[in-house]
Image (cartoon, rainbow, N blue to C red):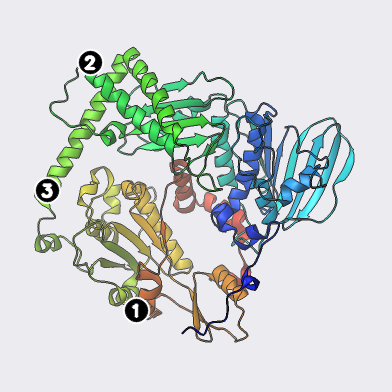
Amino acid sequence: MSTARKYTARDITVLEGLEPVRRRPSMYIGSVDSKGLHHLVWELVDNAVDEYLNNYADAITVTLHKSGEAVTVSDNGRGIPVDLHPQFKKPALELILTTLHSGAKFGEGGNYIHSGGLHGVGSSVVNALSRKLVATIRRDGYEWQQTFKKGKAVEKLKKLGKFRGHGTTIYFEPDPDIFRTTRFDADWIKSHLDDMAYIHKGLKITFKDEVARQTYDLTHEGGLPEFLARLVQEGGKAPVTESAFHVVSAAKDGQNRMEVALQWTESTDETVRSYVNGIRTVHGGTHESGFKSGIAKAIRNYIETHELKTKGLSITAEDIREGIVGILSVFVREPMFQGQTKEKLNNPEMNSAVDNFVRPSLEAWLNANTTAAEQIVGRIILAARARLASREAAVQIKRKSVTQRKLNLPGKLADCKSTNCHETELFIVEGDSAGGSAKQGRNNQTQAVLPLRGKILNSEGMALNKVLANAELAALVSAIGVGAGDKLDLRGLRYGKIILLMDADADGHHITTLLLAFFFRHMTELVKNGFVYLAQPPLYRIDVGKETYWARDDEHKQEILASLRSNAKPEITRFKGLGEMPPRTLAETTLDPQNRTLLKVDIRSPLDSDKAFVELLGKDPATRYQFILDSAALAQVDELDV
């Protein structure tokens, strides 16, 4: 018989106003890390874009202020209404910014034909998660302003005076009580705005970076074709055809509008970017599924119609799409996004709608450009042959035998027993001491450990033959099994996860950066295909009574300490290195898949990544000196590891 206290109506808590957002921010912005922080900017920009989509605005300005911790988003649209709402007796501006699910995008009055913000929570969420927000409205011949704090109005709406223009300006400072960091990344904001300028080629977007004292005009009259050319160039692989496929639907107002730009390249990757009402859907959705199926059907129809011989090859949809770089932009009157972060579209009708748009358009283009079509089909046949050859080689080799395999492995590698690439992991650690702890704490069935001695060679700007003359990097390449440079072949991959496990200090971060540069320059396909990870070992152990907490760094330590409610004095232990950490602790916090946190290394922009490694590790010290000057303000003197 349970002795638990009675569960009654008194146990029910009702959160009012914007308190649900402050209590559970991740439900509305995905996370409270840097990604969630920047999502606040995207929400306000999306609202401004909605004015453009419905022909009420043609310019947006985003300003990152000198502190790096405040942003202003301004448009020249109609301006948020400021008159009193007849039911709630509040100015519409205050109602929109302090109430969830409020706005003009739910009704049928025709205020918004196309919109990215149909949930009515975007601007109110930004307000809820800001320590300060100031809304300035220009409309009806006057300028108005109201200030808010943590989702609540701190003053009444003020009429500032007469003003001829029109539009909305929102200034906000994210709340440090909510976010792990409140410092914005100027490059991230600029890249996001740049993408939007391509999607909306008639929209003038200006980004003012007051931190770097730079102003950028991000208008792109070339639209999607210009965007496609940039993505192909960034991919670093030659296009198969000289011209690209580009088509725009001739839909009437109020109906779905679509635009596609597509080109095949010599890359083995498939790159598709999809957008709904100007918002990037990073997880795809029904529109992207229709896009992919339409491409496959068009190619198959072309092959069958022209009776092209494929010599008995069974060509798959993946063969057809190998090497494509494609952009899909659709405008939907009633988009059904999955969640407030809008990363996936769920409208079921969009699958067939996009399929029926892409397939006949691409078929017509192929028939009108037979030389390009033959080059594309030839590329697809090569992809199918490579896939079959890979499958046959895998069947024949089957890793040969464990004994034969071990003959070519570096002696200091503590290999795992399993030969199944889908479950094996390789931990790269610094030094024999850390290697010893990792070897004792690992699961030797699936986890291998390779210790490296000292700081490895800086391979930035070096030829591959000189890099592989280094014993540590040669051992690393040998252990992974795929080779390096142009001869890299993923069919030899021995581990499904390659995990960089370094000390959580400055030296560890430096070694991690050197290894990332090596992978980026000489084993790029490993990174592109998602095989490289960063481990997150703790730097601190915090004991409070019978509870134990693990902190990754000083900032995380302060977060944990601030969240403690116990009156007991915490005992804090700082690990000098992984070698000083008991194997059991290392296993529990960093090696065990059930408890650990891994960060997948991703190349968001090859050009930006290239620039970063050149500046940080290249031969020219001037770029590093400038980086130190630019970043000095971010460093905390008491946290410097010297």
Up-down relation of residue 150 to residue 508 (above or below): above
Image location (x, y in percent) of residue 545: 53, 87
The residue indicated by pointer 1 is 583
- Which one is earlier in the sequence, the residue at label 3 or at label 2? 2
- Total residue callouts: 3
Farthest-out residue, right: 161
For the residues labelled 3 and 2, the Cα–Cα distance comes to: 34 Å
Q: Which mark is residue 395?
A: 3
Farthest-out residue, top: 368
Q: Which of pointers 1 and 2 indicates the residue nearer the eye?
A: 2
SS at mark 2? loop
For the residues labelled 1 and 2, the Cα–Cα distance comes to: 65 Å
Task: Identify which amino acid the numbered label 3 is placed on.
Answer: Val
Q: Which mark is residue 450?
A: none
Q: Are marks 3 and 1 in contact (CB under 8 Å)?
A: no
> Is residue 109 shown to the viewer in this render?
yes
For the residues labelled 3 and 1, the Cα–Cα distance comes to: 38 Å
Q: Which of pointers 3 and 2 indicates the residue nearer the eye?
A: 2
Is residue 273 shown left or right of residue 422? Answer: right
**Quarter of the image holding residue 401?**
bottom left
Farthest-out residue, front: 1
- Which one is earlier in the sequence, the residue at label 3 or at label 1? 3
Up-down relation of residue 216 to residue 406 (above or below): above
Name the one closer to the observer, 509 or 414.
414
The residue indicated by pointer 2 is 306
Name the one closer to the observer, 462 or 606.
606
Q: Residue at x 35, y 79 (%)?
A: 584
Q: Residue at x 31, y 29 (%)?
A: 296
Q: Are marks 3 and 2 in contact (CB under 8 Å)?
A: no
